[in-house]
Every structure is written in structure tokens, then in C-alpha cells.
Amino acid sequence: MDKVHNVNHKAGKVTVVGLGPGDVAYMTPVVKEAIEAADVVVGYKTYIDLIQPMLENKKVINNGMRREVERCQKAVEIAEEGHQVVLVSSGDPGIYGMAGILLEVKEEMGSNIDVDILPGITAVNAAASVLGAPLMHDFVVISLSDLLTDWEVIKRRIRCGGEGDFIVALYNPKSKGRTTQIEEAREILLQHRGEDTPVGIVRNAKRENQEMTITSLGNMLQHNIDMTTVVIIGNSNTYIKNGKMITPRGYKI
Amino acid sequence: MDKVHNVNHKAGKVTVVGLGPGDVAYMTPVVKEAIEAADVVVGYKTYIDLIQPMLENKKVINNGMRREVERCQKAVEIAEEGHQVVLVSSGDPGIYGMAGILLEVKEEMGSNIDVDILPGITAVNAAASVLGAPLMHDFVVISLSDLLTDWEVIKRRIRCGGEGDFIVALYNPKSKGRTTQIEEAREILLQHRGEDTPVGIVRNAKRENQEMTITSLGNMLQHNIDMTTVVIIGNSNTYIKNGKMITPRGYKI
């Protein structure tokens, strides 16, 4: 058998890995090993840059934002050729990340390659650890981006989060072109809880240029909120003490 | 100054760390470093056992289940003496873990010691990665344990999770003494979604003796569910393909 033939018959694989917040101190060893073992690494440029020192002697395929499907097709194609491909996601690839898109694309392409998914620390966990302990009870995670989801569906979910007295964590709260959703979300939640409900705002949680604010549902819009921000709105028991946002779990202290 | 005086004035600290699922391959480097730098490690026996090889030459204080408050008091007391204390939590200490209790206990004790919280991979992220990509859209996390929370509150939350068409992740679904909650949860969700809604059941996600089942809301109770299990119920778009549970995010594939 010639070399090309051999390559074609070696089992390729895509491993979708979560880098966590960005700082390698928060990346799990199993993800690091997967990157080291890969011969091709595919990802959005910003995330590729975060792991640049680990990419020597590897083929790197990066492209811009909003080209997720194309990136997944590329990853599957290369794995079909017999390569060990790592597809890079920030945070956890299973939470608004690349894991689902990769699986959907693989099925659409009729591919039988192996796929492995390695979780990472997602933004809401990182943000919570910076704020104190706001997520100690039942919570909802909602993305305010209406690029792929009808805004009416998102609004209903915010309402349900309010009605259920859940802690509410908001991803993608605001972007340059999308500014009213966070205002509407706040209005909806104010129908269920008071103006003094604690709110934590974390930009770049556990990575460079981290910023953290603890405020209230009444005052939250006075603070800087953008696409790199996670907003966590407390439930009816959440309180602030010595600069920490705490949701009690119910233990007798 | 004598030695004791010195010790008393050295700044003690409690670092609450998340071990992740249990396998050290899923523990972040920053958590490993914190454990290595500690002179005292406090935790529930089962979790202490997971990191035994890292505990040489350290004082270890472990105790049994349901003694969380006592464990936190101990950690604060020892830090007050000037020690670097690590308080160990499985998963993420900020999600039904030790972070909140430690902060509450510290405040109650009027202590001014520094507290640092280091997130970990929580069970729902680990379970999702085993199932495929079920958490790719908005989701709720609910603990079915009514030891510390009124069952009526939990039921309302399950209902809201159903009404909002959220993916619903259930922690502590069942224990030896608590068997009816998962049945009631299923009944409530069946009022909002069909019997054929995909359900993923993961025991010991990403640790020894991992077991994974993909089933449906109609059939889920026929499978083994206990305290080490996370149950993930899909939203109205979740589907099963080639043994993977996938919730589409809305991309055009």
C-alpha cells in the first residue's frame, strides 16, 4: 500500500475542546493533551491566538466570526482524510459553543468519523466565582442574542425565569448593533422582583482585563455591558455582603 | 517577635476549589496549584480521597456528609490562625457547592480573611459532553433535593422550565429516601412537551464507572437514576441522531 492509501485508512477524529475563559490556568489537562496530540487545529482566530504557544508544528485553520458552519465542515473534511483534528471553542463547547454545530454538520455530511467533546469552564461559572457565590441555587441561562432565536421566545424565557424565582444568567446581553434586549429583559424581571435585587456584571471573567461590578436591578443599566459580559440577576434571597454576591442555599448557619 | 506571634500575623486565606468531575484530567491547573500551595486541606472524605496523592505533608481535615457548615467553620478558624487553607468541593464550588456556605459562615463569624473561589467543571457540563450537545440553547438547572428547599418552590420551577421550553437539567434527581420527586418532575414536564422528548441520563459523568443512557420523557423512569446522576431533558427541538443528543442552536447547516 502506498502512503496516501495508508493515510486514508487511518481513523480520523474531531475532538471539540473547551478552552475555558482563556487563561491557560483554567484549561483542563485533558484539553491540553488533545491539542498537543492533534495534527490540525481549527478555530476562530481570537481563540487560536489564546493557545498560540501550543501550536508549533501543527496545521492551523482559523477564520472569522459567524463562519461556524464552514469551520465545522472543514474540521470534518480533514478528519475524513485521516487526521486528528481539534476544533477549538472558548468556554465550554457544549454551552452556546461549537459541539452542537459540529455534530449537526457531521450528520448533514453523512460522515462516520469519531467525535469527542471535552468540556470547559463556561462563562457563567467563571463569572460567578468572581462575584462570590450567586449561583448556589436553581438558575436559568439565557442568551439575549436574537440572531438565531426569535425574540418572543427569548422574552418568554426571561418571564419564566422571573416567575420561577430562578437566578437568571444572561449571555450575549448586548452588542454594538443590539442594545434594547437587555433593557427589555430588565423590565420583564422587574415585574417579578424588586429594584434592589442584586445584579452582578462581569466582563472578561477570569481572563485579561477582567472587570466586575455588583449593582442592582434598578441601577444595572448605568454600567458597561457588552458582548464579553455575563450578567447574573439574583433570586429573591440573593444578598450582597462585603462586596460579595451570595445566594443562600438554605443551610442553617 | 516570637514565632507564634509571626504566625498570627501572617495573612491566612481560604481558597474554595472545584475539583471538577473527579478525574484529575478535568481539574484545572490553577486548582492543582492552590492545593499544592496549601498547608491545610479541608473537605468531605470522598473528595479528599480523589486527591490523596497531592496531600503529602499537608494537614488534612475531612468529615462526613451533611456537615458542610462545620467544615466551613473549621476552614475559617484555621485561616484565622494564618494558614493557607484549601476547601475542596466536587464539580464547581459555586453550583450547589461549598462557595456560598463558606462565604455565609465567614460573615456569620465576623471574619475578615481573604476568600478566593476557583471554578470547576460542574456535573451538567460534564454530562452534556458525554451525551453529545444537549445544552446548546437556553437551559435551567434545578436540584430536586427538597432537604433545604420547599418542594412547592421546586415544582413551580420545573413548571416554569417546561413553559419556557428550556432544556431542563436536574441535579440530585433521586436518593434512597427520596424517590417520588423525579416522577412528579416528569409529570409536570409532560404537560408541556411530548413523551418522545429526548432525555439523557448520566451517572458518574467523566469519572470512574460512568454510565450513559439516551431515552425519552415517556421511558425515562425505566432507567437507573440516583444521587450521582444528572438528568437532561431536551427542549422541543432536541433530537437524537447516531446515539448523540443534540439541541440545535438555529444555524443553517
Image: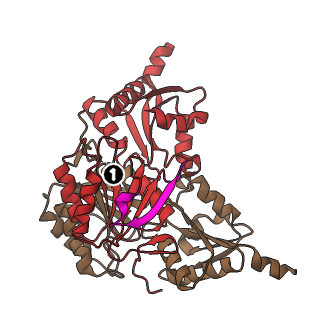
Chain colours: A brown, B red
Q: Amino acid at mark 1?
A: Pro
Q: Is B221 contained in the magenta span?
A: yes
Q: Chain of mark 1?
A: B
Observer-nearest residue: B43 or A121? B43
Q: Quadrant of residue B214?
A: bottom left
Q: Residue furthest right?
A: A1
> How many residues crowd mark 1 within 10 Å: few (<14), some (14–19), many (20+)?
many
Observer-nearest residue: B173 or A34? B173
Observer-nearest residue: B7 or A29? A29
Q: Position of residue A231 (x, y in %)?
A: 31, 62
Q: Is residue A213 left or right of residue B210?
A: left
Q: Position of residue A108 (x, y in %)?
A: 52, 85
Relative to B156, residue A180 above or below = below
Q: Quadrant of residue B202?
A: bottom left
Q: Position of residue B251 (x, y in %)?
A: 43, 83
Q: Residue furthest front?
A: B222
Asked whether residue B111 appears in the rendered view, the answer is yes
Q: Position of residue A86 (x, y in %)?
A: 62, 69
Residue named by callout 1 = B173
Asked whether residue A165 appears in the rendered view, the answer is no
Identified at 33% across, 48% down, the residue is: B174
Relative to B210, residue B69 above or below = above
Range of residues picked out in magenta: B205-223
The kind of secondary structure element at disc 1 is loop
